Amino acid sequence: MSQSSVNIEEVDVCKCGYYCRLKTSRTPLNPGRRFFGCKASNENGGCGYFRWIDPSLENVDESSLMNRFIDGHNPIDRLKRKVTELEEERDSLKFQLNENEEKMMVLNKKLKEVKLQRDWENVKFNRVVIVFLCLLTIKWFFNIV
């Protein structure tokens, strides 16, 4: 049976009483080979239960293994490509962030200029209103006297 067609009908239970997790080997001797293992590691008080699901690679023809890893089917190559894509996306996002920060600085500077201009216009308007009120007050005062 091939690796993808293995039918796992029963889940193993270890000596600790836990259902065993289906894990995948990442070792050079058994790359991608699946197995059941105790939920807890030996260091954490686990029982060390272990059973291979996939057949040993010793009996597999080397050329069939090589064919499985050609054309991007090698999980390591796929992960490397994914890492490269994510790094490129990260660099692109950093560049966009820097551009947006520069735009934000320019807009903040313009906003300050607009606020100063508005404040100056308010001051000028207030001066006109004060002068007008002073003139009205003087006219009113001399009309009374």
Image (cartoon, grey):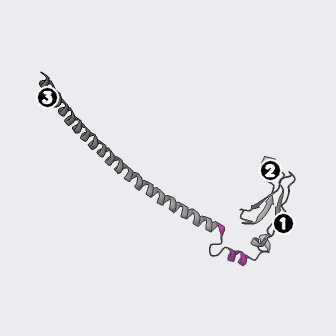
Residue 106 in the image: above or below residue 24: above
Rendered residue at 55%/61% (across/down)? 86
State the image quarter where residue 96 is shown.
bottom left
Amino acid type of the residue that numbered disc 2 sits on in the rendered structure: Asn
Front in this rendered view, residue 119 or 15 = 119
Please report contact status of discs 3 and 1: CB closer than 8 Å, yes or no: no
Q: Nearer the viewer, residue 122 or 22?
A: 122
Q: Quadrant of the C terminus?
A: top left
**Disc number at residue 42?**
2
Judge depth for marks 2 and 3 and give the one in front.
3
| Disc 3, SS | helix
For residue 67: magenta? Answer: yes
Instruction: Give the number of the disc on residue 139.
Output: 3
Residue position marked by numbered label 1 in the rendering: 9
Marks 3/1: CA distance?
104 Å
Q: Residue at x 21, y 32 (%)?
A: 130
Q: Bounds of the magenta span?
A: 60-75
88 over 102 or under it: above or below: below
Residue 69 appears at what percent x and percent y?
Answer: 67, 73
The amino acid sitting under disc 1 is Glu
The residue under the point 81% across, 64% down is 52
- Which of the two discs, 3 and 1, labels the residue nearer the N terminus? 1
